[in-house]
Amino acid sequence: MSGENERTQVAPRVHRNGTSREALEAQLRECHRTLGAAIAAMEAAAPNARDYYVQGPGTWERAQLEHTTRLLSVRRVQLELATIWERISDG
């Protein structure tokens, strides 16, 4: 999970006066799991052409593009958090 995201994500530094590594990892694991469930739900809720054709040509394609953009945004957040999690785990 390295690359562009790793350079742009600020990760917490584990130290004795801060939150424990275990607690940070548990928080990020839960975020990752929850976002994974959200992604699955969003994929299941993808636009269906039969719900858009009555609105005219190009409407379904626009709905698809908007849906894909939202889905990519959530995936990007999940990747950013995974990158932070990885950096914490690596020490």
Image (cartoon, grey):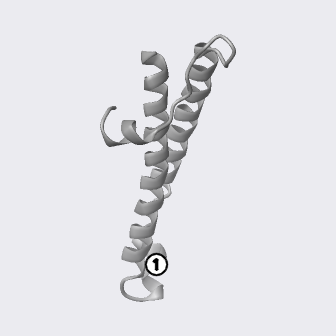
**Where 72 falls versus 14 (above or below)?**
below
Q: Position of residue 35 (x, y in %)?
A: 54, 40
Count of number-bearing discs: 1
The residue sitting at 67% across, 19% down in the picture is 19
Q: Quadrant of the N terminus?
A: top left
The residue sitting at 40% across, 72% down in the picture is 49
Q: What's the amino acid at mark 1?
A: Tyr
Q: Name the residue at the top extreme.
A: 16
Q: Is residue 27 left or right of residue 5?
A: right
Q: Position of residue 51 (x, y in %)?
A: 48, 74
Residue picked out by circle 1: 52
**Where 81 falls versus 86 (above or below)?**
below
Q: Is residue 73 left or right of residue 6?
A: right
The residue sitting at 42% across, 54% down in the picture is 72
Tag 1 secondary structure: loop
Q: Position of residue 57 (x, y in %)?
A: 37, 87
* Badge 1 density bin: few <14, some 14–19, many ≥20, Cα 10 Å: some
